[in-house]
Image (tube, helix red, strand yellow):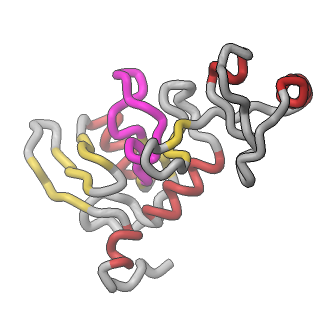
Amino acid sequence: MHATPDQLTGEADTPATLAETLTPLARQVLSGLLCDGDLEVHVDDPLTGRPIGIGRASRNVPAWLARAVLDRDHRCRVPGCDRPAVHLHHVEFYEHGGPTDKANLSGLCWHHHQRIHLDGFTLTGNADHHLAWRDQRGRLIGTTRPALHQRLLGRPPPTT
């Protein structure tokens, strides 16, 4: 099902729809689904209609979004690191207003995730395109693009 907040509260002029077919749902059907079903929040890209994240609804990354980020990144996003991405990191920290969206989440190895939180290193940029890795003084160490971008350029994927 796809519904806006106004559709969930009954204040919208248009009905909620089934996600796959866009079939309109009667208000009574929507009410039953809301009573018995699980609610999953996500934000859609206004151009493509595809989910891009959950915005500020939670700092916790839902499984579908974690899979999308790890499928994009495969390896740690720090330049030169070939370790598997096993941690998801908010590029703009959630506590500083960063959304839990794919473009703000980066796959990192344990070591580099610790360097950010304990040693003051930073990642900046849009994780769907490029990220810049900086030391504690803000000096640029290097930039990186997602593994998916590298594959589209004809470069082989990282080995496991």
Relative placement, left or right, of 30 versus 94 is right
Q: Vertical placement of 95 versus 91: above or below?
A: above
Which residues make up the magenta segment?
90-107
Considering depth in this image, is 110 or 87 the residue closer to the camera?
87
Q: Nearer the viewer, residue 132 or 57?
A: 57
- Relative vertical location of residue 86 with respect to residue 5 in this rendering, above or below: below
Residue 5 location, quadrant: top right
Q: Is residue 145 above or below residue 119?
A: below
Residue 155 image point, x, y percent: 32, 84
Taking the image as shown, residue 21 lies to the left or right of residue 92, namely right
Could you say where residue 46 lies in the image, as x and y percent from the top left? 45, 42
Q: At 56% from the left edge and 27% from the top edge, which residue is drawn? A: 58
The x, y position of residue 128, in whole percent, is: 36, 54
Q: Residue 16 in magenta? A: no
For the point 57% across and 39% down, the residue is 61
Query: Picture quarter containing residue 136?
Result: top left
